Amino acid sequence: MNTPQLGIGMTSPRTRTRMVDRLREKGIADARVLAAMAELPRHLFVENALAHRAYDDDALPIGHGQTISQPFTVARMTELLLNGKSPRKILEIGTGCGYQTAVLTKLFPEVYSIERIAALLDRARANLRAVKQVRARLQHGDGHLGLPEAAPFDAIIMTAAASHVPPALLEQLLPGGRMILPLGTQEQFLWMIDKQEDGSIQKTRLDPVRFVPLLNGQQ
Ligand code: SAH
């Protein structure tokens, strides 16, 4: 077996197409999400040493004790956020390496993303530049507070798990808007929070998931 060729093959567009085929088989149906993930080179968001695993359906370490989310989870959360419509403005909490941010940038006209670890935010900025997705506005800070200066948002995604929905985020969601986030400490589930036009809140529990915890403050 020719190892160098194998190395190239494992980050090739064909490998990415296979990842997208698997997402479709697992139930992701929104063609916009599948197209965005087919175009984005996920291997550029992970360390070189892990690039050959970038198209497996796994979370991978990105340093600072954090992870890049599993492709299926990224696709699932994005599809739920789009909700078959074309929402305009989204806030992401937990930029990490910027992969989810890049997917969102392809699909939402206005993207804001907050990360509490400055070094990761710098990495995300470089990664987003490398894949030519520079429209997202990245902010160093504690996502518990949301981004009042840019609120309200049509959609909010949190990519770290909390014990409860941060109240500021709920406030910054527009009526008719949707938030997708993992909740729980030992056992985590994805939750869909819909703010109705009358301001009332509908909460729906979805898939079991595993995310790093939402932490306080910034570093
Ligand atoms: N969206 C990323 C997932 C990153 S992991 C992806 O595409 O793969 C979750 C991220 O949330 C970590 O980078 C972590 O530092 C960040 N995080 C945790 N608590 C936070 C907080 N209170 N505010 C902002 N970011 C936070």
Image (tube, rainbow, N blue to C red):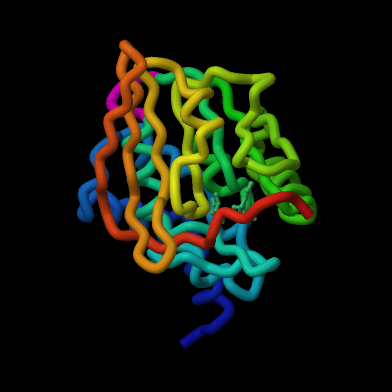
Residue visible at 27% across and 30% down in the picture? 202
Looking at the rendering, in which quadrant would you find the C terminus?
bottom right
Residue 1 vs 21, above or below: the answer is below
Residue visible at 47% across and 65% down in the picture? 59
Residue 62 vs 165, above or below: the answer is below
* Drawn side of residue 50 relative to residue 122, left or right: left
Q: Please state which of residues 153 and 26 is positioned toward the viewer in this rendering.
A: 153
Quarter-wise, where is residue 62 in the image? Answer: bottom right
Q: Please state which of residues 80 and 20 is positioned toward the viewer in this rendering.
A: 80
* Residue 34 is inside the magenta segment: no
Percent across and percent down for residue 103 are 50, 40
Percent across and percent down for residue 12 are 49, 60
* Residue 105 in sight in this render: no
* Drawn side of residue 77 relative to residue 40, left or right: left
Percent across and percent down for residue 114 are 65, 40
Residue visible at 47% across and 29% down in the picture? 170
Percent across and percent down for residue 176 are 35, 17
Quarter-wise, where is residue 138 in the image? Answer: top right
Per the picture, the main secondary structure of the magenta-coloured stretch is loop
* Residue 178 in sight in this render: yes
- Magenta extent: 82-86
Q: Please state which of residues 164 and 58 is positioned toward the viewer in this rendering.
A: 164
